[in-house]
Amino acid sequence: MKKVYLLINILIVSIFASSQTSDPAAKAILDGVSAKFKTYSTVQANFSYKVENASGKALSTKTGSLMMKGTKYKVNFSGQEIFCNGTTVWNYDKSVHEVTISNLDASSGMITPQKLFTNFYDKDFRYIMNGEKKVGSKTIQEIELTPIDKSKPFHKVYVQVDKATKTIYSTKVLENAGNRYIYTVTTMKTNAPLSDATFTFDKSKYPGVEVVDLR
């Protein structure tokens, strides 16, 4: 569960010196990403997720998918499926055929997929521009971010934005323990119809599943 939410928490920001203000150019880019995302009625994305050690050696590579509609979302990643209908969260673990049910706590500070793509950066981080580069035919703008809260399990994040589409291309999280987590969007489809039922766990489709209700 924690590993999946580390993935969902994968975009954050800033500079270590608390007296330093964030870069207006970086904020303008992040504001553009947020504004663009808010125009979408639905989002469907596929992504890759790579873990590296401190020297850059790849430890593992996985893939996953994400669907969003308003405050609802569904994540498929690493043997887990997470459903959220806006009020309730179901976390299904395929390896043990068990689903855990909990209430969505909006005050917990947890970064949901929606926050990930909108104004997650305003209060918790500072940020600076780290230049532009070409990745294939794309122009990528990189923003360097550092969490203000030093108790976070990571100390630096690099967010890459596709300049033309104003969408997140990838993020790299540098964990305090030394590992690096790299998330790259491989495909994205927006505004396609998605049924509300997509975001609710249907027990009838998982015969024999063990239910752990924590509500």
Image (cartoon, rainbow, N blue to C red):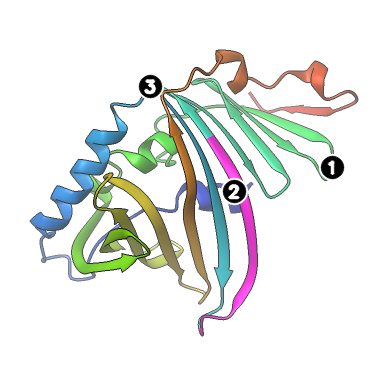
Label 3 packing within 10 angstroms: few (<14), some (14-19), many (20+): some
Disc 1 on helix, strand or loop? loop
Q: Disc 2 residue type?
A: Val
Residue under the point 24% across and 52% down: 163
Residue 23 is situated, as x and y percent measured from the top left of the image, at: 12, 60
Query: Which is more toward the observer, 68 or 99?
Result: 68
Residue 155 is situated, as x and y percent measured from the top left of the image, at: 37, 68
Alpha carbon distance from label 2 to label 3: 24 Å
Residue that label 3 marks: 41
Residue 125 is situated, as x and y percent measured from the top left of the image, at: 25, 55
Query: Which is more toward the observer, 79 or 150?
Result: 79
Residue 38 is situated, as x and y percent measured from the top left of the image, at: 29, 29
Describe residue 55's horizontal placement relative to residue 78 as left or right: left
Q: Disc 1 residue type?
A: Val
* As drawn, 99 above or below 193: below
Q: Answer yes or no: do the residues labelled 2 and 3 have beta carbons within 8 Å?
A: no
Alpha carbon distance from label 1 to label 2: 16 Å
Alpha carbon distance from label 3 to label 1: 34 Å
Instruction: Looking at this view, name the residue that lies furthest to the bottom.
Output: 55
Q: Answer yes or no: do the residues labelled 3 and 1 have beta carbons within 8 Å?
A: no
Residue under the point 71% across and 32% down: 100
- The part of the chain drawn in magenta is 55-66
Residue that label 1 marks: 96
Disc 2 on helix, strand or loop? helix
Disc 3 on helix, strand or loop? loop
Q: Disc 3 residue type?
A: Ser
Disc on res. 4: 2
Residue 149 visible in this rendered orientation of the protein: no
Residue 58 is a magenta residue: yes
Residue 170 visible in this rendered orientation of the protein: yes
Label 1 packing within 10 angstroms: few (<14), some (14-19), many (20+): few
Residue under the point 39% across and 32% down: 107
